[in-house]
Image (cartoon, rainbow, N blue to C red):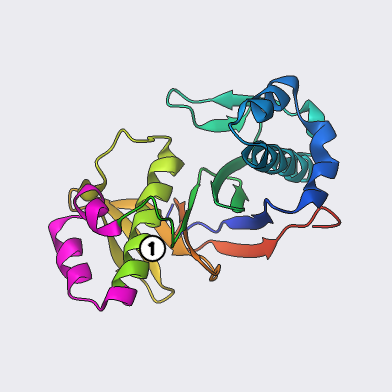
Amino acid sequence: MAGGTEQVHVWLLNLDDCALDAQSSVLAPDELARARSFASQRLGSHYSRCRSTLRTLLAGYTGQPAASLRFAYGPLGKPALAGGEWHFNVSHSGAKALVAIASSPLGIDLEGLDNPAIDPDELLPLVCNRTETATLEAMAARERHRSFYQLWTGKEAFCKALGLGLHIELPALGQQTYGRRGIMQMSRENQALEWYCYGLPAIPGYAASLCLPSATATVRFQAYTAAGK
């Protein structure tokens, strides 16, 4: 609900921090197997550190042992706690990851600004509608680059919140300013939706967005370390 109050915690992880390996004992056998399946040791380490931190964080919210937590998956693969009241979403890019936790559905997206495999100009027609494209093209190059990524992460966060994955055309989505807090209200085919996109504190080299079914949420953003949350 737009008028509801929501407490959302967003945790920033450094996946290159080997101290996170101390949590690996909470991983399930299938998670350990998946970590070993990655093409490089670094990617496998990133996966296991992210997954073990997710379990550790959720254990703090649920009061359950991290190793005993079980996950369920939606029709398009969105993970959720099996039988749990807490909702979460995870996004990672490069050596960084974000974990968002709340009592209602949410989505989060993180994208590196300098990924050589991504050309924002080529992605414009896949991400933006005509109005957004015209607005971006009128900007100076540096501003256009960051604004594109902020717009993109907002749309991706919305799709993740609904568990839609790639089953929605991003140009059909739009954003309009809501209130005075810099919150953007999502729309689809020009119809306003009761979903709202929050920008997050600056993460050097990255753009990130959080999407919620509330325009009045309180978002707490903090870094996570294995030594203490």
Find out whether residue 130 is within the magenta segment. yes
Residue 147, compared with residue 100, is above or below; it is: below
What amino acid is labelled 1 in the image? Gln
Q: Residue 118 at x, y = what percent?
A: 35, 52
Label 1 packing within 10 angstroms: few (<14), some (14-19), many (20+):
many
For image coordinates 67% across by 37% down, the residue present is 41
| Residue at screen point 58% across, 63% down | 219
Image position, residue 183 (x, y; %): 40, 67
From where the camera sits, is residue 65 visible?
no
Q: In the figure, residue 224 lies in which quadrant? A: bottom right
Q: Is residue 13 magenta?
A: no
State whether residue 215 is above or below residue 52.
below
What is the secondary structure assignment of the residue under circle 1?
helix
- Side (left or right) of 6 relative to 62: left
Magenta: predominant secondary structure element?
Answer: helix
Q: Tell me if 48 is positioned left or right of 128 in this view.
A: right
Along the line of sight, which residue is nearer the eye, 157 or 176?
157
Q: Which residue is mark 1?
A: 150
- In the rendered view, tell whether residue 110 sits above or below residue 140: above
Q: Position of residue 39 (x, y in %)?
A: 58, 32
- Magenta span of residues: 120-143
- Residue ID at (17%, 55%): 129
Instruction: Give coordinates of residue 64: x percent, y percent.
Output: 81, 34
